[in-house]
Amino acid sequence: MEKQGGEVLKQLAIENVCRKWFEENRNLFGMQAELRMKLFDELVQLRHKADAFDSGCENCRRLEKRITELKRYKTAWDSCRALVAEQAMDEGLWFVAATAPEGYLQQELRRLHTAIEAAAKEQQS
């Protein structure tokens, strides 16, 4: 009987130690769960920031593409203005027209030059 009583006391002591250990460490388990939740929240926030960064990069790529297009247009515009300046100096284009078709062609050429020069002045101001 004493042996059984000793076993029961031993069992109770083990249970008491286990219960005490669990009580002491329960906060640790709770803190671990809380820490996991905080880490998860931070990961979610980082994912949102990464998505926003990717979106920003996409906007930058679109902007770079648009800048490239505008540079092409500017190059074409500069070429057009250079051609107008060259034609303005070409006396062969500004002769006195002998026929109606030549007169019409010169009239339209002058209109074109006037429009391009006006646009160039507008761009400079």
Image (cartoon, helix red, strand yellow):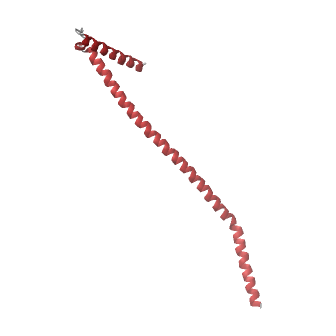
| Most foreground residue, 58 or 113 | 113
Q: Quadrant of residue 79?
A: top left
Instruction: Answer above or below: position of 72 versus 53.
Output: above
Figure quadrant of residue 75: top left
Q: With 12 as the anchor, is 60 left or right in this view?
A: left
- The N terminus is located in which quarter? bottom right
> With respect to residue 12, does 113 lie above or below?
above
Q: Horizontal and vertical percent for residue 47?
A: 54, 50
Residue drawn 33% across the image and 24% down it = 78
Q: Is residue 107 above or below residue 6?
A: above
The reply, left or right, for residue 29 in relation to residue 117 is right
For the C terminus, the quadrant is top left
Looking at the picture, how far across and down is residue 74, in whole percent? 36, 27
Residue displayed at 64% across by 61% down: 33
Q: Vertical placement of 14 versus 80: above or below?
A: below
Can you give x and y, in whole percent of width and height, for residue 56 in the image?
49, 42
Question: Residue at 35% of width from left, 25% of height from top?
Answer: 77
The residue nearer to you, when weighing 43 against 84, is 84
Image coordinates for residue 103, horizontal then vertical, percent: 27, 11
Residue at the limit of the structure toward the front, as seen here: 100
